[in-house]
Image (cartoon, rainbow, N blue to C red):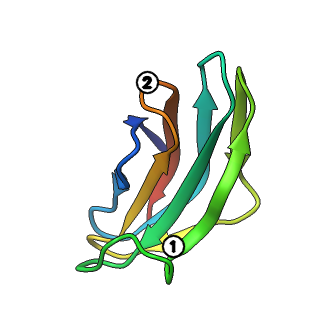
Amino acid sequence: MSIRNANVTTVASQIYTSTGNSAVLTIHLCNYSGSAVTANVFVVPNGSTANLLNIIYANTTITSQNTLITSTEKFILGNGDSVYANVSANVSVAATISYVGI
């Protein structure tokens, strides 16, 4: 099992890209700011972009000093598939992805 960390910004950006086949086990979005933020998370096929067809969490509120944890859904990603995220305020959320190659 491996982890990947990334800062999440207001622009939907890759927070994890699969090299080969992998399974995303958990996604943690930790709001370390003093205010609530909203977050969007996307699972994006190789060659595509984050959009409404691949959003899995839309405008989900993360209260101050709290974490959104996705652990019941497992995503099997092929080579080049990605997880993207964005939030409503910069310098507020850190992402941690737990994954395993398969």
Q: Which residue is mark 2?
A: 91
Q: Is residue 22 left or right of residue 68?
A: left
Residue 90 x, y percent position in the rendering:
42, 31
Task: Pinpoint residue 58: horizontal percent, then vertical percent.
Answer: 63, 63
Q: In the depicted view, which residue is nearer to us: 40 or 80?
A: 40
| Number of numbered discs overlaid on the protein picture | 2
**In the depicted structure, whether residue 60 falls above or below residue 96:** below
18 with respect to 66 (left or right): left
- Which residue does the numbered mark 1 point to in the structure image? 76
Residue drawn at x 61%, y 40% as measured from the top left: 28
Distance CA(mark 1)–CA(mark 2): 29 Å
Q: Amino acid at mark 2?
A: Val
Q: Position of residue 70 (x, y in %)?
A: 69, 52
Identify the amino acid type marked 1.
Ile
**What secondary structure is found at the residue carrying circle 1?**
strand
**Residue 34, relative to residue 40: is it above or below?**
above
